[in-house]
């Protein structure tokens, strides 16, 4: 039995020899299929195993009687799951409630075992164990970033001696009703997975850094005695009001050096700017340690008013959500009045729920709190629902004699991850369950013929997940919109609004925003704002040695953080050759402008195009632009005797000898090691 490092946190740290290979391990999104569930706790495992033919899948291990397994299973003895199939191979999870060895008696040990007897070579496998609610560890990008382990025979197992201390599990939310669920994600690694890692998107961080660096700011606001510098294009992209003020018919101070902001405190405007550049609610500035809750409530009310003034709906909802936590006898009337004035229906609903409690209402009447509301405003709200060739599914309440309560619930197929996110569940319309209404659901959940053609049905089996939350008062009324800062920045390129720099590439002209280019590329920053700056006064910048369609793709990546599709202007049978050439040119451009994520995205895509006709040019490119992992994938291709024979037959190695003789030496060294 092979163990990984004692602590689960060390999973992603490769050794020095492997650092280059693993440094770029792929972060591509793959579909991870459900491979069934095993329930253990009373002897033999029961459940259902599903044959997943694809290279990735996950299996659930439900420990249903934890205290019994702990009491009856000695150290060194494991409880095993059902055998399940992923990628054409049979696997099993081994659970040791009291550790797999004497030095681990205070821990739970978990291992994944290959139980196939037909495996002849070595399988490189990326896998991880997580509790079922640890969603961040179940994303395909996380699994693909894991260091692969070698599985070569039925005697091979890998895992954790100390997956979790028992006392930590027993204090945690993972143990419910003497039961916990472990998810094991498995991905059988391809050559590309082993070598290419795409860095995570950094556009959020780059845009927020713009505010801190103040580089390329082109507008100044004066609020009281303080001045704030910002970027017109970012403000316009994020707020319709700022767009109208700065670029529309009602624009003010277009030529003015400073724009005055009235009726707002400087710390509120600073928080407003912080949100615009980060899409997150900033923390309140504390001038003294004693400011406390009352000051925070006042600050949140002012920030809510500012969010409404500048049409920032996400910030407005974030403020409403926080203000719900501040509602008490002394604050409810002012919060309710503001909610009415600013049309904050959710916040108003929470205030009414608070006021409906008799004790709260009595206290407020005692201090004439209702008089304030009567003087300033008077007035809450409602909802509805809808069979033949469908699968129907319902949620039943089994408890007797219960008062009405509200439930947020959702049914989904187990692989519909987007519907299982907590943000999605909280966005669901709440349903009233009571003695009179015990059953709710969907009469037309899924059409049978559509289900039978879908990937949800595997091995004559499908799995439904039901997410259920008993709604709190805040859940019922406040829905925070998802972050959309990336969408706003990408819209800037499409609209070309207030672009302040022009590039000429051949006969093509492109406009862009200096501050965005500088935030995303250190080379553009140096060219536009540094000592080597060029064309800062408004002239056209000429880009040499690059095609227009490549520069267009480069700009698209800068504004979206995604690899664009190649523009199709060629016949279908020439398309692949053209795409390989375009990707090579785009990789060169990414290297030239220090866009590491784009460079690795191009490497990853080029790996899919390596064949006898392209491998030598791709290998040469990889050597010239220091793409060590792309080079390694090329070497893996060349190490196959059949591939090498074909390349030698067309004098492919001659090209390498002429352009990069050092590569030939490396290749020979690799072949010698076979």
Image (cartoon, grey):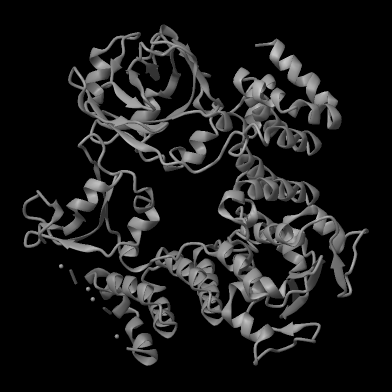
Which residue: 34% across, 59% down? 426
Q: Quadrant of the C terminus?
A: top right
Q: Is residue 118 above or below residue 624?
A: above
Q: Quadrant of the N terminus?
A: top left
Q: Is residue 634 above or below residue 258?
A: above
**In this view of the protein, which residue sits in the foreground, 308 or 45?**
45
The image quadrant that residue 16 belongs to is top right
Which residue: 15% across, 67% down? 386
- Look at the image and tell me whether residue 261 can be seen: no
Which residue in the rendered view is the most extreme toward the right?
531
Which residue in the rendered view is the most extreme toward the front?
649
**In this view of the protein, which residue sits in the foreground, 335 or 575?**
575
Residue 660, x across and y down, in percent: 83, 29
399 relative to 573 in the view: left or right: left
Residue 18, x across and y down, in percent: 65, 22
**In this view of the protein, which residue sits in the foreground, 535 or 69?**
535
**In this view of the protein, which residue sits in the foreground, 637 or 290?**
637
The image quadrant that residue 20 belongs to is top right
Which residue: 34% across, 44% down? 415
Which residue: 27% across, 65% down? 429
Q: Is residue 568 above or below residue 181?
A: below
Q: In this figure, what is the number of numbered marks? A: 0
The image quadrant that residue 85 belongs to is top left
- Look at the image and tell me whether residue 76 can be seen: yes
Residue 453, x across and y down, in percent: 26, 47
130 relative to 15 in the view: left or right: left
Residue 512, x across and y down, in percent: 73, 69
């Amino acid at each position: 039995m092979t163990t990984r490092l004692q602590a689960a946190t060390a999973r992603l740290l490769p050794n020095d020899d492997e650092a280059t290979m693993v440094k770029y391990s792929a972060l591509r999104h793959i579909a991870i299929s459900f491979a069934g569930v095993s329930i253990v706790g009373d002897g033999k495992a029961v459940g259902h195993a599903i044959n997943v033919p694809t290279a990735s899948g996950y299996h659930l291990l439900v420990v249903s009687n934890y205290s019994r397994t702990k009491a009856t299973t000695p150290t060194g003895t494991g409880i095993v799951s059902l055998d399940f199939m992923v990628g054409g191979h049979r696997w099993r999870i081994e659970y040791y409630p009291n550790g797999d060895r004497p030095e681990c008696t205070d821990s739970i040990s978990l291992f994944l075992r290959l139980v196939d007897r037909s495996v002849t070579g070595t399988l490189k496998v990326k896998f991880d164990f997580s509790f079922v609610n640890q969603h961040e560890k179940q994303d395909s990008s996380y699994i693909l970033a894991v260091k692969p382990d070698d599985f070569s025979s039925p005697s091979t197992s890998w895992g954790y001696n100390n997956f979790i201390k028992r006392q930590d599990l027993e204090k945690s939310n993972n143990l419910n009703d003497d039961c916990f669920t472990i998810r094991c994600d498995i991905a059988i690694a391809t050559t590309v997975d082993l070598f290419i890692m795409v860095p995570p998107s950094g556009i959020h961080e780059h845009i927020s850094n713009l505010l801190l660096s103040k580089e390329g700011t082109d507008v100044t606001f004066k609020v009281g005695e303080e001045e704030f510098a910002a970027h017109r294009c970012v403000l316009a992209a994020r707020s319709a009001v700022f767009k109208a003020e700065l670029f529309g018919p009602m624009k003010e101070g277009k030529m003015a050096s400073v724009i005055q902001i009235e009726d707002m405190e400087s710390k509120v405007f600073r928080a407003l700017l912080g949100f615009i550049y980060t899409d997150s609610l900033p923390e309140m500035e504390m001038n003294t340690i004693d400011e406390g809750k009352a000051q925070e409530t006042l600050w949140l009310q002012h920030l809510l008013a500012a969010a409404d003034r500048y049409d920032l709906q996400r910030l407005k909802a974030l403020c409403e959500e926080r203000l719900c936590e501040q509602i008490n006898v002394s604050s409810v009337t002012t919060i309710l009045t503001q909610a009415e004035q600013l049309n904050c229906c959710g916040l108003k609903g929470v205030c009414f729920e608070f006021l409906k409690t008799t004790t709260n209402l009595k206290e407020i009447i005692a201090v004439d709190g209702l008089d304030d509301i009567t003087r300033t405003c008077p007035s809450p709200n409602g909802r509805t629902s809808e069979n033949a060739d469908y699968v129907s599914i319902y949620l039943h309440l089994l408890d007797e004699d219960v008062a009405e309560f509200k439930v947020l619930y959702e049914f989904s197929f187990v692989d519909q991850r987007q519907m299982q996110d907590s943000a999605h569940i909280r966005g669901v319309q709440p349903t009233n369950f009571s003695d009179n209404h015990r059953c709710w659901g969907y009469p037309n959940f899924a059409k049978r013929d559509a289900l039978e053609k879908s990937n949800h049905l595997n091995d004559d089996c499908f799995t439904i997940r039901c997410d259920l939350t008993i709604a709190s008062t805040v859940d019922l009324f406040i829905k925070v919109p998802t972050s959309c800062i990336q969408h706003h920045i990408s819209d800037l390129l499409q609209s070309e609004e207030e672009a302040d720099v022009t590039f000429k590439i051949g006969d093509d002209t492109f406009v862009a925003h200096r501050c965005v280019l500088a935030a995303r590329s250190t080379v553009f920053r140096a060219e536009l704002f540094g000592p080597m700056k060029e064309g800062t006064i408004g002239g056209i910048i000429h880009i040499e040695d690059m095609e227009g369609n490549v520069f267009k793709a480069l700009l698209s990546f800068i504004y979206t953080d995604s690899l664009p599709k190649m523009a199709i202007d060629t016949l279908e049978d020439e398309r692949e050759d053209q795409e390989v050439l375009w990707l090579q040119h785009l990789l060169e451009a990414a290297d030239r402008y220090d866009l590491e994520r784009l460079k690795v995205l191009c490497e990853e895509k080029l790996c899919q195009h390596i064949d006898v006709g392209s491998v030598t040019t791709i290998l040469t490119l990889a050597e010239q632009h220091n793409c060590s992992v792309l080079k390694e994938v090329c070497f893996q291709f060349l190490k196959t005797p059949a591939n090498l024979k074909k390349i030698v037959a067309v004098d492919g190695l001659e090209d390498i000898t002429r352009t990069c003789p050092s590569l030939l030496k490396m290749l020979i060294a690799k072949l010698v090691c076979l």
